[in-house]
Image (spheres, rainbow, N blue to C red):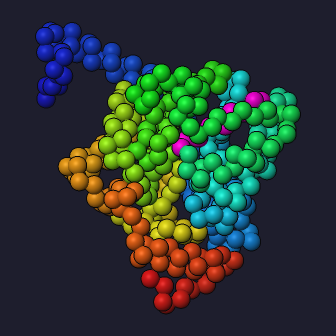
Amino acid sequence: MPIPLPPHMCKLTAAAALALMCASLAWSVQTAAEVVPGSLPLAWNTGGPKCMEMPEWQIHEYNPSLFILRQSGCTDFEKPFVYLLFGGERALLLDTGSRHGNIVPALQLTIHRWLSRNHRSAIPLVVVHTHAHSDHVAGDAELLALKDPGIPITLIAATVEATKKFYGMANWPDDPGSVDLGSRVIDVLAIPGHETVGVALYDRQTGILFTGDNVYPGRLYIRDFSAYENSNQRMIRFTEGKPVAHILGNHIEQTRTPFLDYPVGTLYQPNEHELALPRGVLFEIQAGLAAMQGKPQRVAYRDFTLWPAGPAFPSTEEDEAKFKRTQQEQLDRMWDQTQPRPSTTP
């Protein structure tokens, strides 16, 4: 069967067009081959089944220069992920966790082990954020108070001005920025919509796109519909032609059962969805937003739910009551989730 030619090749001879297509394919393969691989766990710790046995943070080595830390649900139901990337000159910490996280011991342990393995005595650490919500900045004060000569810290405030300046973003939100960690460049895009200071980071070394709370397996809270849609389009355009190994967000709220999520306030999620999503989810989100035709509504998809929030979608008394029931049951059972649940549980 003949290969259909893209429109920009229509004026070329068939031989020239085919040669150009082959060259393009070779470039893509070469680029993908340069991506440093890593691995994700089959399952993450959540908040049990017995909180007495759970560490405050799970530490996972994706590869020798990227570590993923997840806060235990036993400390806070948000259970956020934070990401630690090492370059030749400095390291980058993406977010600092939620309430009661006590992130410093786990972070120090991880960095000092990395230093030991790499025969170094110190590395500067830059602390940045995907956005300014409390469940991702709660550890800021704790890190600022850390006095460790092996880990000199610079913290970039979660504000538009500080973010623009650090990444060299001339015009927010349209212009991208970047940071070089030393032979490791991280590209940065503004993605407001969930929150005003939202950013996505693309790691050229691993091909991972870190999307904060804008994209993850769970409820995608959209507070500014137009900004969120533009931000999603921005990520689609930016990643075109680039290898994307994974999209990694800040939470998992979805179960492994399609279209079903865990209620807000859940600590223990033994059947949760995997963390990673493919680039194709950006197109699925875009199609879902377009289908709303400017009238935001909550729609469940297989791996996520589009969840408009804000003044037009305030929390109801039923929402609040469900959260309180979920939290109370989970807290009552946090020391042993293995026992059968009460029959009255909704």
Seen at 50% across and 57% down, the residue is 252
Seen at 70% across and 57% down, the residue is 101
Q: Is residue 249 left or right of residue 74?
A: left
| Outermost front residue | 311
Q: Is residue 199 above or below residue 322?
A: above
Quarter holding residue 270: bottom right
Seen at 48% across and 37% down, the residue is 200
Image coordinates of residue 130 in percent, x first then y, are: 54, 42
Q: Is residue 331 above or below residue 94?
A: below
Q: What residue span does the magenta drawing correspond to?
A: 123-131
Looking at the picture, tell me which residue is in the foreground, 309 or 123: 309
Looking at the picture, tell me which residue is in the foreground, 257 or 187: 187
Looking at the picture, tell me which residue is in the foreground, 339 or 216: 216
Image coordinates of residue 103 in percent, x first then y, are: 73, 51
Visible in this render: residue 211? Answer: no
Visible in this render: residue 75? Answer: yes
Q: How many numbered badges does the structure rendering display?
A: 0
Give the quarter of the figure containing the C terminus.
Answer: bottom left
Q: Is residue 97 magenta?
A: no
Quarter holding residue 39: top right
Q: Is residue 2 above or below residue 193?
A: above
